[in-house]
Image (cartoon, rainbow, N blue to C red):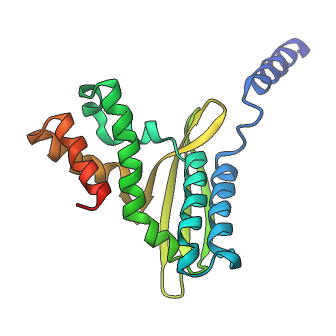
Amino acid sequence: MRRPFNALLTILMILLLTLPAHAGVPMNTVQANVNKVLDVLRDPKLKGESAKEIKKKKLRAIYEQMFDDVELGKRTLARNWNILSVPQRQEFVILFRQVLEKAYIDKILAYTNEKIVYERESMVSGNQAEIQTKIVTSSKEIPITYKVILKNGSWKVYDVVVENVSLVLNYRTQFNDILAKNNPEQLLEILRKKVKGQ
């Protein structure tokens, strides 16, 4: 009777030893990164208009740690990813990040110490999870789900769903519409202009 138990224990030990030691629980990773963002936003030394660029620089560094740009770009373009050449994909990933920054940075900088509640973590597969959170304001609760993927031993965000609206699906619709009438180079040109504010 001891043999099957010993075999099971051995298998469990092997599985545990082969898991990335520094991956951590997905929710802990998301929470740690969100806390870093909050530290920047709450920093009393970074108040006022003059500190805006320093804040942005610090937030960019956190974004790079927190998000998987390539996965985000790939999922946003879906099947259209394959029609872009490798250099076009590389440029798209950079431009898309800049478009997201322009669209969301002011909303992030407008944070005024609302409470963030981490509700639950759901494993979607062995390397994907969803972290359900909510921002609690004085008048409402805003549900936010972070979709994360395990890559090279780190959990990275590849989609954010705010009040049931997926960042990936929202932009996928826009890019599908553009690529239905334009080629990849024209899509990149549209994004270049958007980044420049034209």
Residue 19 seen in the current view: yes
**Labels in figure, total:** 0
Residue 16 at x, y percent in the picture: 78, 27
The residue closer to the viewer here, 123 or 105, is: 105
Outermost residue toward the front?
A: 50
Q: In what quadrant of the picture does the N terminus appear? A: top right
Which residue is depicted at the point 69% across and 74% down? 43
Q: In this picture, is 194 found above or below 85?
A: below
Which residue is depicted at the point 29% across and 51% down? 171
Outermost residue toward the left?
A: 181
The residue closer to the viewer here, 37 or 61, is: 61
The residue closer to the viewer here, 139 or 3, is: 139
Image quarter of residue 103: bottom left
Outermost residue toward the bottom?
A: 138
Drawn side of residue 126 relative to residue 24, left or right: left
Drawn side of residue 25 relative to residue 123, left or right: right
The residue closer to the viewer here, 34 or 131, is: 34
Q: In what quadrant of the picture does the C terminus appear? A: bottom left
Q: In this picture, is 24 found above or below 48?
A: above
Residue 155 at x, y percent in the picture: 61, 41
Residue 63 at x, y percent in the picture: 55, 52
Drawn side of residue 24 relative to residue 89, left or right: right
Q: In this picture, is 134 found above or below 23?
A: below
Outermost residue toward the right?
A: 2
Residue 181 at x, y percent in the picture: 8, 41
Residue 173 seen in the current view: no
